[in-house]
Amino acid sequence: MKNHYSLVIIGAGPAGMSAAVEAANHGIDVALLDEQEVPGGQIYRAMESIPPERAKLLGSEYLHGEKLVTELRNASIDYFPGTQVWSLNEKLEIGLLHHDKTAMISADQVILANGAIERPVPFPGWTLPGVMNAGAGQILLKSHGIVPKDGVVLAGSGPLLLLLAWQYHHAGVKIKALLDLTPMQNHLRALPHLPRALLAGHYLSKGMAYKKDLKQAGIGTLHNVSNLVARGQSKLDTISFKHSGQIHSIETDLLLIHFGVIPHTQLSRAAGCQHQWNPSQQCWTPGLNKWGSSSINRILIAGDGAGIGGARTAEHAGRLAAFQALYKLGKITRTERKQLARKDRKWMREERHIRPFLEAFFHIPEKLLKVPDDNTLVCRCEEVTAGEIRSAVHAGHSDSNQVKFLTRCGMGPCQGRQCAEAVSHIIADANGDNKPQELYRGRAPVTPLTLGQLASLFPEEQE
Amino acid sequence: MKTDVLIIGGGLMGFSTALQLAQRGVKSVVVDKDSAGRHASGVNAGGLRQLNRHPAEIPLSVAAAEIWHDIKSLVDKNCDAKFPGQIRIAENEEDLQTLGQRAELVRNLGFQHEEMISREELYKLAPSLVSHCKGALICRNDGYARPFHALEAFRQKALSLGVKYLPSTRIDAIEHDSKGWRLSSAKGEFRAPVIVNCAGAWAGQVASTLGEPVPVKPGAPMLMITERLPHFIDPVFGAASRKLSFKQMQNGTLLIGGAHMAELNFQQHKTTMNWAKLAVSARTVLALFPQLKDVRIVRTWAGIEAFMPDNLPVISRSKNYSDAFHAFGFSAHGFQLSPVVGIIISQLILDDHTNFNIDPFSINRFDSF
Ligand SMILES: Cc1cc2nc3c(=O)[nH]c(=O)nc-3n(C[C@H](O)[C@H](O)[C@H](O)COP(=O)(O)OP(=O)(O)OC[C@H]3O[C@@H](n4cnc5c(N)ncnc54)[C@H](O)[C@@H]3O)c2cc1C
Ligand SMILES: Cc1cc2nc3c(=O)[nH]c(=O)nc-3n(C[C@H](O)[C@H](O)[C@H](O)COP(=O)(O)OP(=O)(O)OC[C@H]3O[C@@H](n4cnc5c(N)ncnc54)[C@H](O)[C@@H]3O)c2cc1C
């Protein structure tokens, strides 16, 4: 690893891979850093090692990634898998941990392509062992072929929920129930976006096919479900929920939940990039120009980390960011940048047809985001409840950072990754604001770093 | 808005002053351009240290310690204050000598709070300390509190006594006329016969407006905090020849400081961690407690504080105006002094004098500036 690169890309998903390939093919020195041991990111996980049977199960969208991974392997890129980036700042210094070795490198340009995380939504019992994110379930399936033995309840809202139900069903997992917490009003909300969505009809038909398949197998979806509660002493044993005006309960030791994905903003916040509330995606996204440049001039953001657009969009956005970096590095002219970008821009537009529909259809009920009841834990690290957050607001602490100082929410080892968004919602609601106003300030290290690892940095530096 | 005293800055100095004034029946308004304590008072290391203070500060610090020990009677909350002592470790003969001389100096000034302890006692207090240390200087009734909770307690108590507080209100201009002070902000105008400059790192701007510039410099000391560990140590540790402040907080986390500075963009209130210096801090900790090498750092941050060239604060009546007062420049050790600063400023305002010797803190000491 060198101390300095023209371009450092963080994240080897579709966005990072396509950016790296494009930049390297233009002859600049590129480092690609990713915490996973293999390329592919969230979606094309374990692409190079997956048995054909399992790959088939994951479908054609998954297999699309093969080309990118091959190109990556063939390009001249300093690719460092197994590398966690724990810090990024506005001077483009990048703190990283590569197989237990700490380093700090710098770059002329950075493309942040670190993707999305699943939206954490606190509800009663969500912290019990046995309640897991659907994405985690999918990772086990993709990487290790591990599936739950004793069946599973799936609950939440979003396309991934249906996809995972379908994938599990075909892998022989018993689906005890599929609970859709999307409210019925969303159909109306989504309707105006349907015509445009039909332009990307393949996404819709895929969803319908999954649904039909499940239905034929006798797995019905319960729609318009609310009041989800997970119960158990030391681990999950029952869930209950409201459907058609009645409370139901199901015995299960595994509940997979999913409420869509949101940009992973910990690094972009720690760097100090500006972010804004995106009402359609119901999350915070970094403010970017059409080339992906953030408020910090030399930091570009591409892929789901820039706003949720899906894997294909990420791939195009990665290339656009690469063109921008190449332009700023003086490798291509303005005109070349425009020309090179043409195809990706067109494809990206087409990819986006489906988004407004999806965002409206899977709009999470505001009530679920804003008003978890007082006893619900919001910050699981420091065990802070929704009620404590509300009392802090009522005592005059009107923003996320003040509430954090007072209650310690967001101060635990996950660095607020699990509660930042929820806290900003609860505060907005308590203040009577119609949208969240502020997230926690980002603080490095965003991934774990020990005192020993830090101590090994800059050995020549004296007191 | 009209008030008796307008206090610029909603940090501990501002609220401590407002609280003292309120207890004596004087109304005040505290304004802050951001939120209370965001820059220094709420984000500091919470150290309640008399140990190794500049001789001029000792009387204030000793008086402050007495208040902190019974802080509940002042602000109704205990601010999570604990008093397990603060220690400065001697790692060699030279350190021992320096610390010994220090102890003598304090005794000669007539104070008893600092004393030397033997190697045996040191290791009783810190069994896991690396074995080469020789002894230490200790102040047994020092300790620490939780800064944001302390600030919150001062603020709430002040509010309960009728103090008004306006966050997100920056004073942009200050004028003096026959009717007293007129201060303007985007949120409106304030009128008051008396003003107090408790503007922390920005206090130099206020002082300049009054025509009395001071060589105050903003700085951004860095801190880092680790994951929770089982309890293993009580006192707060520093070392005679290293930059270190190290303590295990009530919840088991380790708070590590060392007076190393982040890069500061003062205009934008933005700090950038200096990882080379934080690495030095980590090495310092591991040199004294090597068993901590696998402990995870959870967060690093920097506050913004006012530093003076002589590291002594300005606690003073204005040079040019008899109805303006200053309390700033605490140079990263003002948390502990804050209860006394409020007393001093309120005495200056209401009694025209104070029981403490504040000559060393006069704004006039920079005449040549
Ligand atoms: C749990 C989950 C499951 C999903 N499943 C599907 C699916 O089945 N089908 C589908 O179409 N879409 C799915 N998506 C959405 C899809 O992943 C994205 O649209 C797509 O992967 C976005 O690509 P990207 O390149 O922006 O980010 P990603 O593919 O997420 O790649 C980001 C990469 O950055 C790495 N990274 C993040 N932070 C750091 C750091 N600090 N240091 C080093 N590396 C870091 C990550 O390990 C990851 O490899 C899923 C998303 C999530 C969160
Ligand atoms: C990281 C760190 C660690 C520290 N550790 C310790 C310790 O362990 N022990 C100890 O004793 N001390 C410590 N200190 C020092 C201590 O925190 C400060 O000395 C003390 O908090 C100063 O209080 P203050 O009220 O003067 O400043 P502040 O808390 O900074 O308050 C000043 C306020 O004035 C406001 N302001 C400025 N200009 C204007 C304007 N024009 N209009 C309106 N408002 C304005 C600012 O927004 C600010 O909130 C530490 C400091 C830092 C930064």
Image (cartoon, helix red, strand yellow):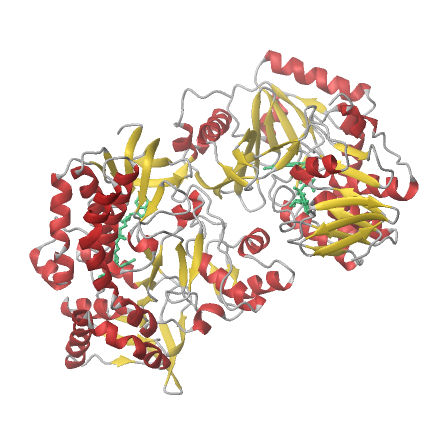
Residue drawn where x is 39% and y is 42% of the image: A297
The answer to whether A132 appears left or right of B244 in the picture is left
A87 up-or-down from A358: above or below = above
Percent across and percent down for residue A67 are 11, 50
Q: Locate residue A47 relative to residue A302 in the image: left or right.
A: left
**Nearest to the observer: residue B9 or residue A181:** B9
**Quadrant holding ligand 2?**
top right
Farthest residue, direction front? A335
Q: Residue furthest bottom?
A: A245
Q: Is residue A218 above or below residue A167?
A: below
Picture quarter with the C terminus of chain B = top right
Total numbered labels: 0
Task: Indicate the position of residue A69 as horizontal and vertical percent values.
Answer: 14, 47
The answer to which image quadrant residue B110 occupies is: top right
Q: Position of residue A14 (x, y in %)?
A: 21, 51
**Which quadrant of the structure image shows residue A148?**
bottom left
Residue B154 seen in the figure:
no
Nearest the viewer among A200 and A33 is A200
Residue farthest to the right, as pictured: B351
Horizontally, residue B119 falls left or right of residue A187, namely: right
Residue A192 percent location from the top left of the image? 31, 78
Quadrant in the picture for residue B249: top right
Q: Residue at x 89, y 35 (%)?
A: B355
Q: Residue at x 84, y 43 (%)?
A: B346
- Quadrant where the N terminus of chain B sits is bottom right
Q: Can residue B180 be seen in the rendering of this structure?
A: yes
In terms of depth relative to the viewer, which is nearer, B133 or B277?
B277
